[in-house]
Image (spheres, rainbow, N blue to C red):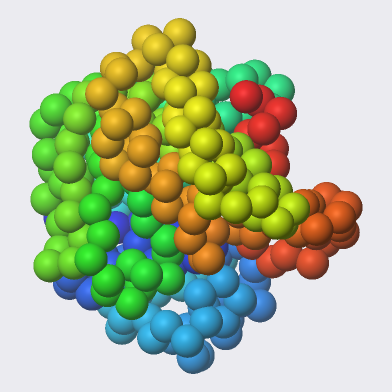
Amino acid sequence: MKQIGVIGAGSWGTSLANLLAKEGYAVTLWVYEAELAERMAITAENDLYLPRIKLSQNLTATQNLSEAVKGKQLLLFVPPSQVLRQVFSQARAEIGENALLVFASKGVENNTLLTMSEVVEQVAPGSLQRSAFLSGPSFAREVAEELPTAVAVAADNPAVAEQVQEVFSTRYFRTYTNQDVIGTELGGALKNVIALAAGVSDGLGFGHNTRAALVTRGLAEITRIGLAKGAQQETFAGLAGMGDLVLTCTGDLSRNRSVGMELGKGRSLQEILSGMQMVAEGVKTTLSA
């Protein structure tokens, strides 16, 4: 597998694209913002979403979605969850019939209450047999800085999970596989809601006791929703559940925790979001949850 397309050049998409490019794959990264794509071609840096990280020479930025999709053996989709349907629908006609599909967006659609795998199956019926879903405790910047990270790759088809595991495994990025797609997705999406609450708690000046209670009871609520949707309970004790929850509720790089902290300090949500470049997925996932 030589040619990979990555759809979405936020911090996470750029970090994963660079990880793959550094492993020797020819990676084409689709960038929504035309001016950013032009700057990246000149500077080899995503100054908007992942500043101060040098990008591999194997990574090519483009604003042409077709160029990023056509002829690729593996496609990684990392747009914000609420626009995955639109982007995947636009890309669908150019996707090769044997291409592996990997999705790393974390969220639940507001209008339909569908997870990303359910959106994918609705847009392109039958495609789940070649799809995998990547989640787990992984701040984009720390991956870009090659700090040791472990994630989960879930797929209905174990052979697909193993292929994706092989591609994404590096000396600092370890992938574990499972077949619990819905559990892996809900763990990754709903932990952002609890992280907002943990941030509010911190912003109000409450202590470590309060945050620990929120994280623990939050995991219980996430697990209940997951089980009601047919997930496996052990998934929520793993990387995609407890691992991602703890990271997002306590880490200073967490966008959702940061939004919650500002809410706790008394700022309005509109004011907070208007000053942010990146997406805090938990804000919209809260409505879905």
Residue 199 seen in render: no
Position of 94 relative to 141 (above/below): above
Foreground residue, 138 or 84? 138
| Left or right: 120 in relation to 33 | left
| Outermost residue to the bottom | 43
Eyeballing the image, is 128 above or below 7?
above
* Residue in front for this viewpoint, 228 or 119: 228
Question: How far across and how far down the image is residue 266, in percent?
Answer: 86, 55
Q: Residue at x 56, y 71 (%)?
A: 49
Give x and y (percent) for residue 144: 35, 73
Residue at x 24%, y 53% (from the top left corner): 150
> Relative to 126, is 48 on the left or the right?
right
User: Image check: 17 left or right of 269?
Assistant: left
Q: Nearer the viewer, residue 25 or 109?
A: 109
Q: Quadrant of residue 214?
A: top right
Residue displayed at 70% across by 56% down: 205
Q: Please determine whether, in this image, residue 281 is positioned above or below residue 44.
A: above
**25 or 188, which lies in front?**
188
Which residue shows up at 38% across the image and 22% down it? 182
Quarter that holds the C terminus = top right
Q: Position of residue 229 (x, y in %)?
A: 44, 11
Which image quadrant for residue 1? bottom left
Residue 23 in view, yes or no: yes
Q: Give coordinates of residue 126: x percent, y percent.
A: 34, 18
Q: How many marks?
A: 0
